[in-house]
């Protein structure tokens, strides 16, 4: 004679959960039931798993199951009793806090080649011009570029002594502190590392560095959703993420995956908004014309679909590429249309961050001040 799972669940309905006043089934204490021939495995959770309580519930479960089944059936019952895992508050900042760094923002994209590093560099410079103290961590282990964009390709970080420990001093240019694997690798050789090696290098850049006091640390993530991304969200209390995409459908599909990664239940990093790069092409000789080479309003529509903020658009202009190549980002050029565009995008990003921080538990509440016409985030 045989028996089924429903027979086991029916038997467990007769047992009261300790201190609950309901049956194990009604109170959702039974987490798993597995049958192997005439052997039954039952996993249950109880709030007070003392040795006495565990023994009592194990005995009751075993007796209830054996009594409910046909007397001819010889069954062995194995019961595992554990304490339920406390549900994590999704608003709590997770990870290891870096002293004196107030806000950490991840700049990400699902797809490579959409200008994420360019956006990161210009956003960092814009924040610095607004009066904030800013750092950039180039977390693109396999294709670092921030050291080139900040025109410090040939500079090496110095070693400083901090509380008896030797730490890296980030390279500083344009008012922004910078660390990148590009400082430590041969530009003519590929970085061929497995995930654990890349994660270890990244941890050194983060925790073995003397960042000092920062209002913002921007993390330039590699494209995709892989080991580096998981290492970052596990190691650092990310305040929020910004997604960069072009209007092209294939880029938007990957951007949606990037958003989904941060919204995973196990990660829960708020997405502050989406930036559309290469939104349209404006030739130098026809500054009033707009040519939507990769499509129109793709990232804007995506932001509406997933109910997140559209932070703004950056056109496909030759000077952006040229400025990045020579290590002089366009945000440094005061009064230009591009500088104004980056200023507006950055202000919106900070505004979204202020709202995000307003929802944190009391221990993480921030004080909001005003600086350069933009809401500032202070502890």
Image (tube, helix red, strand yellow):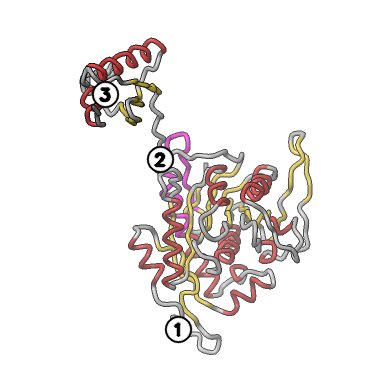
Q: Quadrant of the N terminus?
A: top left
Residue drawn 41% across and 77% down? 295
Q: Quadrant of residue 253?
A: bottom left
Give the residue number, with chain letter if any, for mark 3: 24
In front: mark 1 or mark 3? 3
Q: Are marks 1 and 3 in contact (CB under 8 Å)?
A: no
Query: Mark 1 or mark 3, which has the lower sequence index?
Result: 3
Badge 2 crowding class, 10 Å Cα cut-off, few under 14, some 14 to 19, many 20 or more, is some
Badge 3 crowding class, 10 Å Cα cut-off, few under 14, some 14 to 19, many 20 or more, is many
Give the side of residue 334 with respect to residue 87, left or right: right
Above or below, 3 against 170 in this view is above
Magenta stretch secondary structure, dominant: helix
Give the residue number, with chain letter if any, for mark 2: 90
Residue drawn 45% across and 52% down? 261
Mark 2–mark 3 distance (CA, rounded to whole Å): 27 Å
Mark 1–mark 2 distance (CA, rounded to whole Å): 42 Å
Helix, strand or loop at mark 3: loop
User: Residue 282 placed where, x, y %?
Assistant: 50, 83
Q: Nearer the viewer, residue 379 or 97?
A: 97
User: Residue 10 placed where, x, y %?
Assistant: 21, 26
Q: Nearer the viewer, residue 3 or 22?
A: 3
Helix, strand or loop at mark 1: loop
Query: Mark 2 or mark 3, which has the lower sequence index?
Result: 3
Query: Mark 1 or mark 2, which has the lower sequence index?
Result: 2
Helix, strand or loop at mark 2: loop
Q: Residue furthest top?
A: 52
Give the residue number, with chain letter if any, for mark 1: 291
Extent of the magenta region: 348-370
Q: Is residue 293 magenta?
A: no
Above or below, 171 against 93 in this view is below
């Amino acid at each position: 004679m045989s028996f089924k799972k429903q027979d086991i669940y029916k038997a467990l309905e007769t047992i009261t959960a300790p201190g609950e006043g309901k049956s194990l089934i009604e109170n959702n204490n039974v987490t798993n039931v597995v049958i192997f021939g005439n052997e039954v495995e039952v996993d249950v959770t109880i709030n007070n798993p003392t040795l006495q309580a565990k023994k009592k519930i194990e005995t009751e479960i075993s007796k209830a199951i054996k009594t409910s089944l046909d007397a001819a059936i010889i069954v062995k019952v194995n019961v595992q009793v554990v304490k339920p895992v406390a549900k994590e508050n999704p608003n709590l900042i997770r990870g290891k806090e870096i002293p004196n760094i107030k806000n950490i923002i991840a700049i990400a994209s699902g797809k490579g080649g959409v200008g994420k590093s360019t956006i990161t560099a210009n956003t960092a410079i814009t924040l610095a011009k607004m009066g904030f103290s800013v750092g950039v961590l180039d977390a693109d282990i396999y294709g670092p570029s921030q050291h080139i964009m900040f025109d410090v390709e040939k500079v090496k970080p110095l070693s400083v002594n901090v509380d008896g420990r030797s730490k890296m001093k980030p390279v500083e240019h344009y008012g922004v502190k910078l660390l990148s694997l590009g400082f430590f690798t041969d530009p003519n050789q590929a970085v061929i590392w497995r995930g654990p090696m890349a994660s270890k290098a990244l941890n050194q850049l983060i925790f073995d560095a003397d960042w000092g006091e920062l209002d913002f640390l921007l993390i330039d993530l590699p494209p995709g959703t892989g080991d580096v991304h998981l290492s970052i969200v596990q190691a650092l209390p990310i305040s929020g993420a910004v997604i960069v995409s072009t209007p092209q459908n294939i880029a938007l599909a990957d951007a949606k995956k990037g958003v989904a990664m941060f919204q995973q239940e196990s990660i829960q990093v708020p997405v502050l908004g989406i930036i559309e790069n290469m939104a349209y092409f404006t030739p130098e000789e026809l500054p009033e014309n707009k040519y939507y080479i990769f499509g129109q309003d793709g990232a804007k529509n995506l932001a509406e679909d997933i109910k997140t903020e559209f932070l703004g658009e950056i056109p496909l202009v030759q000077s952006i590429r040229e400025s990045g190549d020579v290590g002089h980002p366009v945000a440094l050029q005061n009064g230009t249309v591009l500088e104004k565009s980056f200023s507006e995008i950055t202000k919106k990003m900070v505004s979204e961050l202020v709202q995000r921080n307003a929802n944190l538990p009391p221990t993480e509440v921030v004080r909001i001040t005003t600086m350069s016409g933009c809401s500032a985030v202070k502890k």
